[in-house]
Amino acid sequence: MAHHKSTIKRIRQTEKRTERNRYYRTRLKNITKNVVLAVNAKDKERALEAFKVANRQIHKMVSRGFLKKRTASRKVSRLNILVNSLEVA
């Protein structure tokens, strides 16, 4: 166990950040999964609605500093291509 005050504080901060990051990682996976499931079910309306939610949430994660701007852009772009593949088919 840590003996210094600063080390004890660092441990507390790390635990908080780990929990926060775990929440956002899980949230990101679930958001993405909702879009993919809707596309696989060939439900265009549900896919578009899930994509709107995903787009909004992913960009919120950027503003909170969880994702980098280009990473978010790439993820949104790939989801958009997936949703647009429904319209072509």
Image: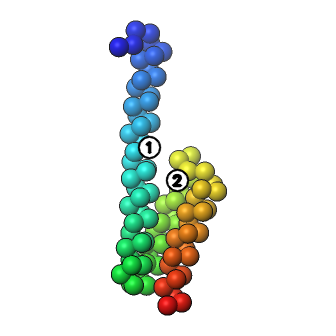
- Label 1: how many residues lie within 10 Å, few (<14), some (14-19) or many (20+)? few
Decide which of tag 1 and tag 2 comes sooner along the chain.
1
Residue found at the very far bottom of the displayed protein: 89
* Quadrant position of residue 70: bottom right
Label 1: state its secondary structure.
helix
Residue at the image position 44 percent from the left and 43 percent from the top: 21
Whether residue 24 can be seen here: yes
> Where does label 2 land, which residue?
61
Q: Amino acid at mark 1?
A: Asn
Label 2: state its secondary structure.
helix
Q: Amino acid at mark 2?
A: Met
User: Do the residues under discs 1 and 2 have CB atoms within 8 angstroms?
Assistant: no
> Where does label 1 land, which residue?
21
Q: Nearer the viewer, mark 1 or mark 2?
A: 1
Q: Is residue 2 above or below residue 72?
A: above
Q: Is residue 41 left or right of residue 7?
A: left
- Residue 18 location, x and y as percent? 42, 37
Whether residue 64 can be seen here: no
- Residue 54 location, x and y as percent? 47, 66
Mark 1–mark 2 distance (CA, rounded to whole Å): 11 Å
